[in-house]
Image (cartoon, rainbow, N blue to C red):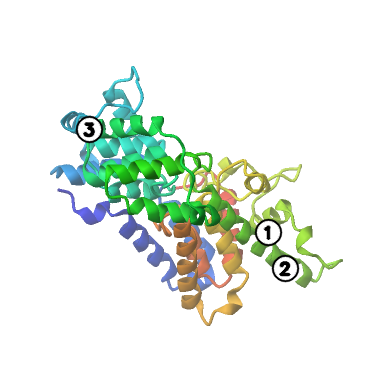
């Protein structure tokens, strides 16, 4: 079997991180070293990468990981699905497992239900499922407010088959909604329900729980907690922008938080991204970092959609806001080490409170932010790296 360390995405990313920040030239050339690390040593780890690695390890394959073809993984999936009596879809379909599995083994990302289907077919653990959801998809873990995911979780936790899942889901569909307990209504439902879900020990308790959440199904995923967290961070960030404006030598008036809009935030966080003649940011696709960062950028349009709840809050949004806050409050920390430690602890708390995994260093954007936070001027370095990604367009090695 190929040495497992070479398949450890986390360890490989940490090696790249430390090679950059421990370089003797980092103090003087932080942006250049960070850009080089991102451009030459980091890559986006896709869902397909995680799935292949998972199967490779579970199957104990002897040939080098890099030489295992897709057909081998497809056959392993086919055999395992047959052994575990798992269909190729949760809903009736004319698609064949061979075609679907090839798709899973080549995609950057998939829908959440694919992870749960694979859990039944490959006999995964709850820990495996959460790993795929939080690391491979960069989304929240098993959602305690989603009846489908709760039933899947219950079956996976107890080693029940897909047939058991189908029976339980049929029961759920016939249930009448049951009023939530007062303490659940008065608190963040996601947090309370997560604790309740984890205490379920038998079918009767599960069915009662499903009836209780049936009336809350409109509260999709983690939006309640995530939006509240986003709004709090955004308000704090607006206050810091007020300070930036009022401390400027060019200030012509005293700004208040009410003056700060999405455009102001874009102007600060994307200060070095080139703009077109209309004042719009140059297309993200023209940045060498676009594929690494999966097209994400904190533009005024994106912020506007978040404020209007037209799009869901992601870990990218929460990490970026917290990074900005730390970059503008560096005076709070005795040294860079303390700043870094506090940033990691703070960001991990924020993410985990929203049912997301803590910082994932193998995610190129998150490694980028971590490298910036240990530079002398975190936001300035962040901006410089973005600028380099456009200036050097087309020169990637």
- Distance from label 3 to label 2 (Cα)? 55 Å
- Residue identified by numbered label 2: 244
Residue at point 55%, 56% (across, down): 186
Tell me: residue 280, above or below residue 105.
below
**Label 2: how many Cα within 10 Å (few below 14, some 14–19, many 20+):** some
- Distance from label 1 to label 2 (Cα)? 9 Å
| Percent x, y of residue 104 | 33, 33
Q: Which mark is first along the chain, 3 or 1?
A: 3
Tell me: residue 69, above or below residue 141.
above
Q: Between residues 182 and 4, which one lies in front from this camera angle? A: 182
- Residue identified by numbered label 3: 77
- Distance from label 1 to label 3 (Cα)? 48 Å
Element under disc 2: helix
Element under disc 1: helix
Q: Is residue 135 left or right of residue 274?
A: left
Q: Which mark is first along the chain, 2 or 1?
A: 2
**Cβ atoms at labels 1 and 2 below 8 Å apart:** yes
Q: Between residues 172 and 373, which one lies in front from this camera angle? A: 172
Report which quarter residue 246 is drawn in. bottom right
- Residue identified by numbered label 1: 268
């Amino acid at each position: 079997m190929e040495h497992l360390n070479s398949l450890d995405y986390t360890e490989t990313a940490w090696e790249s991180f430390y090679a950059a920040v421990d370089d003797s030239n980092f103090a003087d050339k932080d942006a250049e070293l960070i850009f080089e690390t991102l451009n030459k040593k980091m890559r986006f780890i896709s869902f397909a990468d995680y799935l292949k690695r998972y199967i490779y390890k579970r199957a104990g394959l002897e040939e080098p990981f890099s030489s295992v073809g897709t057909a081998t993984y497809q056959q392993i999936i086919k055999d395992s699905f047959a052994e575990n009596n798992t269909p190729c879809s949760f809903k009736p379909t004319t698609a064949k497992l061979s075609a679907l599995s090839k798709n899973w083994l080549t995609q950057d990302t998939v829908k959440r239900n694919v992870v749960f289907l694979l859990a039944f077919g490959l006999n995964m653990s709850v820990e495996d499922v959460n790993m795929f959801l939080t690391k491979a998809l960069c989304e929240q873990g098993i959602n305690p407010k989603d009846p489908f995911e709760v039933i899947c979780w219950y079956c996976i936790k107890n080693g029940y088959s897909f047939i058991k899942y189908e029976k339980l889901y049929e029961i759920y569909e016939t249930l009448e909604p049951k009023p939530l307990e007062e303490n659940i209504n008065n608190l963040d439902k996601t947090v309370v329900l997560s604790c309740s879900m984890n205490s379920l020990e038998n079918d009767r308790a599960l069915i009662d729980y499903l009836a209780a959440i049936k009336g809350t199904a409109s509260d999709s995923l983690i939006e309640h907690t995530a939006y509240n967290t986003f709004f709090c961070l955004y308000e704090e960030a607006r206050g810091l922008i007020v300070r930036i404006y009022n401390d400027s030598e060019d200030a012509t008036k005293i700004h208040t938080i009410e003056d700060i809009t999405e455009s102001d935030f874009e102007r600060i966080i994307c200060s070095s991204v080139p703009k077109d003649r209309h004042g719009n940011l140059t297309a993200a696709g023209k940045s060498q970092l676009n594929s690494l960062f999966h097209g994400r950028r904190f533009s005024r349009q994106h912020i506007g959609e978040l404020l209007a709840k037209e799009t869901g809050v992601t870990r990218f949004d929460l990490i970026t806001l917290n990074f900005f806050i730390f970059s503008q409050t560096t005076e709070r920390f005795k040294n860079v080490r303390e700043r870094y430690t506090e940033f990691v602890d703070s960001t991990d708390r924020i993410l985990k409170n929203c049912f997301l995994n803590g910082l994932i260093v193998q995610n190129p954007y998150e490694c980028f932010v971590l490298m910036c936070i240990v530079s002398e001027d975190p936001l300035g370095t962040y901006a410089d790296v973005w600028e380099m990604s456009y200036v050097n367009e087309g020169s990637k090695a």
